[in-house]
Amino acid sequence: MKISLINNGFEITQNEKQLLVHTTENPAIFVGVGQEKMEIYRGNFDIHDYIEERIPLRFAKITDNIVEFSCGKDSPVQITMKITHQNNLDALLSFESQNQHLNRFWIRLSATQNERVWGCGEQMSYLNMRGRHFPLWTSEPGVGRDKTTEITFLSDKYNKAGGDYYHTNYPQPTFISSNHYACHINTTAYADFDFRNNDFHELQIWEIPQSIELYSAPTYLDIVEKLSLRFGRQPKLPEWVYNGIILGLKGGEENTFSRMENAIKKGVPVAAVWSEDWVGLRITSFGKRLFWDWKWSRKRYPNLEQKIKELKQRNIRFMSYLNPYLCNDGELFPIAKQKGYFALNKDGDVALVDFGEFYCGVVDFTNPKACEWYKEEIIKKNCLDLDISGWMADFGEYLPTDNIYLANGVEAKLMHNAWPTLWAKVNAEAIAEAGKTDDVTFFMRAGYTGVQKYCPLLWAGDQSVDFSRHDGLNTVICAALSSGLMGNAYHHSDIGGYTSLFNNRRSKELFERWAEMAAFTPVMRTHECNRPDENFQFDHDPSTIAHLAKMTNIYRHLVPYVKALADEASEKGYPLQRPLFVHFEQDINTYDIQDQYMYGKDLLVAPVHQQGVTEWKVYLPADETWINVWSKQQVQGGQFITVAAPIGQPPVFYRKTSKWSDLFAEIAAIK
Amino acid sequence: MKISLINNGFEITQNEKQLLVHTTENPAIFVGVGQEKMEIYRGNFDIHDYIEERIPLRFAKITDNIVEFSCGKDSPVQITMKITHQNNLDALLSFESQNQHLNRFWIRLSATQNERVWGCGEQMSYLNMRGRHFPLWTSEPGVGRDKTTEITFLSDKYNKAGGDYYHTNYPQPTFISSNHYACHINTTAYADFDFRNNDFHELQIWEIPQSIELYSAPTYLDIVEKLSLRFGRQPKLPEWVYNGIILGLKGGEENTFSRMENAIKKGVPVAAVWSEDWVGLRITSFGKRLFWDWKWSRKRYPNLEQKIKELKQRNIRFMSYLNPYLCNDGELFPIAKQKGYFALNKDGDVALVDFGEFYCGVVDFTNPKACEWYKEEIIKKNCLDLDISGWMADFGEYLPTDNIYLANGVEAKLMHNAWPTLWAKVNAEAIAEAGKTDDVTFFMRAGYTGVQKYCPLLWAGDQSVDFSRHDGLNTVICAALSSGLMGNAYHHSDIGGYTSLFNNRRSKELFERWAEMAAFTPVMRTHECNRPDENFQFDHDPSTIAHLAKMTNIYRHLVPYVKALADEASEKGYPLQRPLFVHFEQDINTYDIQDQYMYGKDLLVAPVHQQGVTEWKVYLPADETWINVWSKQQVQGGQFITVAAPIGQPPVFYRKTSKWSDLFAEIAAIK
């Protein structure tokens, strides 16, 4: 990257491409003062900013690699920027504020016509973010996420939870541009990346950020490789994961294990059974909730210890559930409270968070001793010592910003976005310290910069149990692809979705379509959803169990290929699920497709994500001959085609030239 | 008012009360640059601003009565402010921009705890605006106007028309503070008055405004008197208005006049019949619409000329309907087009506005010749020569801001807010030129600064046919009170409301409650609503006609009192309907009441605006003995009481000391 002086300013370019330009007339940096208003309601945030000042820093004085920005020639310097070239291709812009009042920062990067931008963590609605702005703040993603739908309206009205296109459990101030560079901002403050302008991208941060990293590379895959090195690569998934499906079952010992046995009897290969309610239940007016006191409930699972042993001998694992809160009526709460491991309120008491008729303390992960305690007492003693092989590490998005004080002395509004990574770190370190990284895993929905290093597996969060555009099956694909570009190699989702509210109920068709997609992801896992009794379950219908068995067999059949992808993920950081364009940069048609994906280099998957269809329109990238795994038909790439897509035959194609052709050719015969 | 130098700045005070303070640390004025995005859909605007710069003007150099504002001591002057004392009590702050790039302006006036602010034109939801901000842009007010209601959700979804609490046909950049001053800004640009802050009111204008007027006075009524002088006073209503009700009837000659005769036969005193469809109909997929070609439809009303003569002999007038558009398939359109009287698009063609399956030209009221033409050809020839005695002068809020060019060369976004007053002026002048101001009237929903001078009578616009908080019966009271404080003496509404959408239907109860309120306003008028056949009408039920006859008789009974109020309106500019606090400044309880009003000094009206109630809670101001017009019970003021409020007996009280006691005492006996 090159910095050059131009008339009244300077520019940063890479290979003649302008990344940033600053002149007196069109300054690249603005600073200011804002007063935010943040209201939290059960993980949903209502955030408003009152911008009191927004000052263009028109004047830039350049000395060597230091730029001093001010309003005018004789005005005091507001911020300094130091440009460090990491190497030819990358640059680091480090900022220092010279005015303590400033708490808002805007920087404009150059944009070009037809440019696409991708990333910003795990985005559910839009893979290409151009034309929209993306507030970056970890939160509940919302129910419906579309202000024109009834379900979003009702969720907003009754639970402040409707959400919008940009709400996500996992935001990240990082994007990749089709101009072959990536930009990452080192901050955990609230940010808003605005890609609506023709000539520039404006990145807004609610502090003067520490630094901005710019990476360029000849191909998108090279950029992903760089980012995955930067943010950290995941360990491989444990071998046992590939044995079959992870069945999400709860309802106590009898219900859980009898239904598991039934599934096995009906031919479903089971890798693990995952029981959230291993900790017991709490009855609220909302319904059955888990008891947030992270230890084995002997009442609900009286023979669990023995059961885990038996299952393991049968090559079936047991998985559990954890989150970073402790309910104030549990056994662990008084211990953590006595030790001072909770975040506090302004009166110095434990800051209690309302989760709906019960209250919890927030284990303060900015306190190293609290982390140690959680690792030792909860993860190692209560999970690993019981031979639990993994868990959902839920939440991470809820750190309140009001009336909460942390051990490290940093404001909660600056730690809020950092929380998911701290939570991931606690989990990963506990497993590593026990020497079990190869054999125990966990999965998270929340994330932020650096979660890549600790979280081995993302799950897409709590989709609605439907085919809706902004909260249904298809959003999982967008989530996998965007987070994959950020260096998260492994992604999966709740088969059938999770959220059933306002009479929205999971159908057999939805479950089966979702399972078809899941067969072509690194992990298959079911979830009963939030209202199990009112929604379709995998074992409600013999034909669905048979369908699930078939899909799990396909999943198992693909294991050799998937393991090769896992090798690639370890070596290069490539995600298993990838946008088409990373392998077909020259085919412009691939750039706006977000409901198909490459599963590795050789498989193209186009999940059916609409109700009641038996055909599906698929784009096949140019300069390749594709083979339909079901019909074996060969199709020349570079065109949209419509294919038969009955239940049980999700549109999947492979490259004719693939070295895995024989493996793929066998898919159609699997039962 | 006094301007004084203080440390690092200056302040403007009145009687020791600080109105504005400016220091280097807390500047009073900010300027900047914004890029607005305005999308119009049938009178509903979606407006967003991107604030590119917002610069505090910290440095103020004061020379005599001129203040030069800049960012710093040695920075260029951005704006100058000239302070002119009109007299001891008032001041004029005139601004001049010294930087042509500036298009945003913010000024902070001092605020105090417990201060109330009222006005901003005709507000439908909140009389006291403290704690909220109020964008000021004339538009459709919206259907539902409450984002938590289903009807607002559906209106937003299908018509972009849900609206919000601040949407109004008649905004005005003027407010009255309980600190005994009024502030008015001379601008027609988009503005947003923000009353959310504890220490200051921040007034935002999308231009450097010409000037700010500050008025102070010892009492609120004195302030209203000043404002009404400033903005212009209405002529008295024609005498015939007081003869009875104005019946809104359409459906052609036979239907209109037979239903009128029926009403008269059933004892309803009729002052006028008002037929919107005098111009004929257009059938669209939405339903029956008027034909926007402003002349008598001989097809629909074959004997109208004769009929008007006959009615007048019976002391009944005929009223019609006009608006400022002409449909492009009417007879007037080609004439106006040929003369060049329409606003144009960028290609120099007539700018056509979509009104739903038909298109209209906008008569360009910035062209004096176009105004003359409208006055002569439409108002004088087509209305007054036919002996029409008045009309609804509808619309005024729809001037698009995009791709429309006006004769005076001013940008449409700066003329948009000015349009209602231009439209009122055309109507008023035509009537005045014909020498008929005493005998002909018109009523408008749209307004802006100066509409007071031209529009003799406001109507509250298109409420929903319900009791809803933000779009129902009660909003009419807030509308009358806020606009009254701005110097609009005469206000009325559609009895029964207008908008019936999404299965919201007018009930008999709603109609009767609304009629009860209307009896205590200067004009009673019914409207069939937008879907006459599906909604309750005054003649659907014998008991409703009887109720309406009684209410109209009460209205007629009050005429001597109302005429005395009209004298007061002419002499002092006091509105007929007034907030309680203007007569009870010392009673703090009166300040937050917006659903009761003083009808003149002596009558207190508390309309029932909820469904299914037979009792009503009323506040009676302190230091007065009140007499219930129905029960004759005497009640000491300074308390909330609950009174019987059956249909037919709206809660109304009069001062025991009133010189009109005898008149009021007779109300209960009226049938």
Image (spheres, coloured by chain):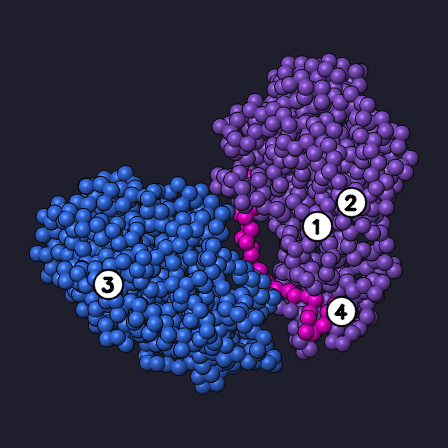
Chain colours: A purple, B blue
Q: Outermost residue, bottom direction? A: B64
Q: Is residue A26 magenta?
A: yes
On the image, the x and y values in percent for residue B298 come to 30, 60
Tag nearer the camera, 1 or 2? 2
- Name the residue rendered at 31%, 62% in the picture: B296
Q: Amino acid at mark 2?
A: Gln
Which amino acid type corresponds to the residue marked 3 in the rendered image? Glu
The amino acid at mark 4 is Val
In the picture of the structure, the residue carrying the numbered disc 2 is A639
Q: Which residues are magenta?
A: A21-50
Q: Residue at x 34, y 42 (%)?
A: B534
Pointer 1: what residue?
A128
SS of the residue under disc 1:
loop
Determine whether label 3 and label 4 are within 8 Å by CB. no
Of badges 3 and 4, the one in the foreground is 3
| Mark closer to the chain start, 4 or 1 | 4
- Which numbered disc, 1 or 2, marks the residue that appears first in the sequence? 1
Whether callout 4 and callout 2 share a subunit is answered yes
- Can residue A109 be seen in this snapshot? no
Neighbourhood count class around disc 2 (C-alpha, 10 Å): few under 14, some 14–19, many 20 upward: few
Q: Is residue A20 positioned above or below B603 on the image?
A: below
Q: Are marks 1 and 2 on the same chain?
A: yes
- Disc 3 crowd, CA 10 A, few/some/many (<14, 14-19, 20+): some
